[in-house]
Amino acid sequence: MSSSSSSSSSSEDGAGNGARRAGDFEGPALIRRRANNEIWPGPFVEDLAVRVAIDASRSHGRLEAARALVRNVFQVCSTWQAASRSDPLWHRLTTVVWGRTHRTQANWHGEYIYRHRTAQNFHNGRPSHETLHFDRSNVDNPDGLMCRCLTLSDTHLACGFADGTVRLFDLDPLLHVGTFYPHHRDRFGRFSRAVAGIVIADPRLIFATMDGDIYVAVIDGQPHARRAHMGNVVDDGSLVDFTGCGRWWVGLYAGVPGRAFHIWDGNTEELVYVNATLTDPEAVMGWHTLTELTETIGRVRVTSQESAVACTGLRYMVLDLRNPELPLHDEESRRGLIVTSLDTNSEAFITVDRRGRATVRQADTLEELCRFNTEQRNVMGCMNSGYALLCTAGVIRVWWIEQLQGEHLYNLNENVGDVNAMVADDRYVAAAGSDTSIHLWNFRAQ
């Protein structure tokens, strides 16, 4: 594994000091040492610290926030240094820098340090690697070993297979802890029961099959999931992708014109929206996905801003899930898009065109945040808050996307062969190979 060539990684995590270096973030102009030792109130200092962290993150990446806080706030005077002991401040800082609203460590200062050091590991390419294992003796159909989709939460990895089975793994320790099955019904083709997508909304696990059925299971509950919605292939076509969050479930269909998007209220499980023509040109291919392995014809992902981003090889759309009747954006791609490259993080999305040019855009405004040339025309991709991971010919390349010009940092050591699915968050990366192996990389701070 090659090391990062970027200089943005910082050894400062908010818990120590260090000498100022050339190019360090200087903080906003209003920070000045008070000649008369005037004492500024704690709430003002905390607000200022949050502003410094936000400005440093946006200018130089999230790893620079800690150094900017130490240099420009906590070292100004003893009164300002006292603010560094405020756990409510670290709660705010962890939220604005790392997007975390609940903690896994003993306090919020510890949570910030943990997230910072994990991001350092991600930036510098220091993961551990494992291959997932589960009992294969009771799998009669070879499709039962073909993983089609992956979903991560803080505590679990869910894997959806071509026979409709979902296998759930606990991430710490890494163990297979549950298997969930769809109901038996008439098949419309070999892959009509294949898992199209999975949503983890603890304690629930929601998954959908390509015939349009949606199931709800309890993570620690029975293996046979409850069917929340029965699909209608004749009226809707094939469910080519399914995603969501606790509040919304989103399905992308192909096969019947004008019914590309289906949106459900995740709380009431009621269908609230059906419309859009995004997949109309792929209608015929949509039917083929039920009976044979085809290229991916559409993908949909959600952001934490209650928006959905979907694409085909010709177009991409952004919907406000609270008001989907009026799409936020509907754009054609002149160069064409690689569908398997689409992914989102909390507020942005990435696409790669057929010339290998990757672009990261803000979902709500389409502001271009980052671009780079992958020099590849057949990629499977995913992203997290600061990095894009793109796999070609079994090699997963990691790109830093917190600057306008993306930077290739390193390749993961393990060659995974042809990949069916990938997923990433700020700690883990998972990939399902066509050889039935499932790989997991863990960047956790030790």
Image (spheres, helix red, strand yellow):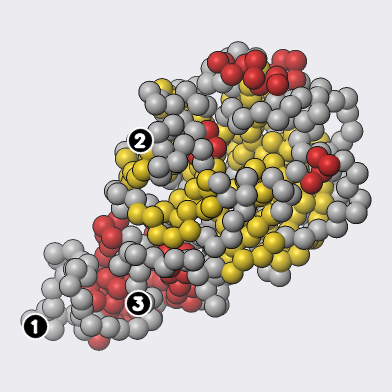
Q: Quadrant of the C terminus?
A: bottom right
Q: Do we see residue 59 in this rendering?
A: yes
Tell me the amino acid under the disc marked 2. Answer: Leu
Q: Which residue in the structure is indicated by mark 2?
A: 366
Residue 403 locus on image (x, y percent): 31, 53
Residue 144 in picture, x, y percent from top left = 82, 43
Q: Of discs 2 and 1, which sits in the foreground?
A: 2
Tell me what residue is drawn at x 70 percent, y 21 percent.
288
Per the model, the C-alpha gap separating discs 2 and 3 is 33 Å
As drawn, the label of residue 36 is 1
How far separated are the C-alphas under marks 1 and 3? 30 Å
Residue nearest the viewer, comparing 377 with 336:
377
Nearest-to-viewer mark from 1 and 3: 3
Q: Earlier in the sequence, mark 2 or mark 3?
A: 3
Q: Furthest residue to the left?
A: 35
Look at the image and tell me whether residue 153 can be seen. Answer: no
**Residue tagged by mark 3?**
12
Secondary element type, mark 2: loop
Left or right: 338, with 173 as reference point: left
Crowd rating for badge 1 (residues with CA inside 10 Å; few <14, some 14–19, many 20+): few
Q: Residue at x 80, y 40 (%)?
A: 143
Work out whether residue 86 or residue 427 is closer to the camera in this orientation and state it: 427
Q: Tell me if residue 66 comes above or below residue 320 in the rendering.
A: below
Cα separation between marks 2 and 1: 47 Å
